[in-house]
Image (tube, helix red, strand yellow):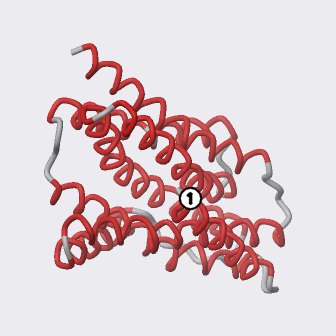
Amino acid sequence: MDNVFATTIIGFIVGIAGTGLGGIVALSIFNPNDKFLGMLLGATAGLMLAVVTFDLLPESYSIGGLWIEIVGLILGILLVFIIEDFIPESHISSFTTRKESFLKTGIIMGIGIAIHNLPEGLAVGSGFMFTREIGIKMALIIALHDLPEGIAMATPLRISGFSKLKVLLLTLISGIPTGIGAFIGAVLGSVSQTFIALCMSFAGGTMLYITCGEIIPNSKTLYKGRSSTVGLVIGFIIGIIITVKL
């Protein structure tokens, strides 16, 4: 029981610290200049595309196979469709509607990140139940992986007009499922591989849709020049380094 408790605490720390630190990074470099914001949004889109392309979907495929990956991907996209029906549609034609558009982006991204953090917690919990060394390694990797996710969530929320404190609290909250997953993984020892694969591709579907359908178009709308595209490429390269090298 002590091991389960300790593993759960570690899971909460890893998830909250990872996304929270990403939020702090986004807030510390925040600048209302549209050219800078366009580049920053492009960079967050690149980061998320790299995480989905080189981490979530390949991991889902290797664990659960092609059809589990496809089903999870479709379900994740359908979730975004449902959420969008409850969030008023807006077009970036004025300052107010622009803020509403970024708010929608931040909310959907936060939900996707929270879902993604559950199987990450399962990996931490299962790792610690296998060996302490594997658990520590998984915890460090996941904390680093959560950094770009915190940035991707915090940036549109901050642009939408949320205070720095609210943005930070929301990024911290999105990391809580990691602790819940760590508890489940520690209790069960080894969880269903199919469930983990489904969660991975499910989160990948939500992030892929919101990145391509919201973040990238909004980054180009903010600034018509090349800065958003340059940011996307830079973010994608950084994302490759984070996901492939760890």
In the image: residue 31, left or right of residue 108: right
In the image: residue 13, left or right of residue 163: left
Residue occupying the point 13% across, 51% down: 192
In the image: residue 6, left or right of residue 29: left
Residue 193: x and y, percent? 17, 56
Q: Amino acid at mark 1?
A: Leu
Q: Vertical placement of 157 versus 23: above or below? A: below
Residue occupying the point 39% across, 68% down: 84
Residue 36: x and y, percent? 82, 67
Choose between 36 and 158: the one closer to the eye.
36
Residue occupying the point 45% across, 43% down: 174
Q: Vertical placement of 191 versus 198: above or below? A: above
Choose between 209 and 163: the one closer to the eye.
209
Choose between 32 and 72: the one closer to the eye.
72
- Label 1 residue SS: helix
| Residue furthest top as drawn | 2
Residue 227: x and y, percent? 80, 78
Q: Quadrant of the N terminus?
A: top left
Mark 1, residue position:
103
Q: Vertical placement of 169 versus 28: above or below? A: above
Q: Residues within 10 Å of mark 1 (few under 14, many from 20)?
A: many
Residue 32: x and y, percent? 82, 59
Q: Quadrant of residue 35?
A: bottom right
Q: Vertical placement of 216 versus 51: above or below? A: below
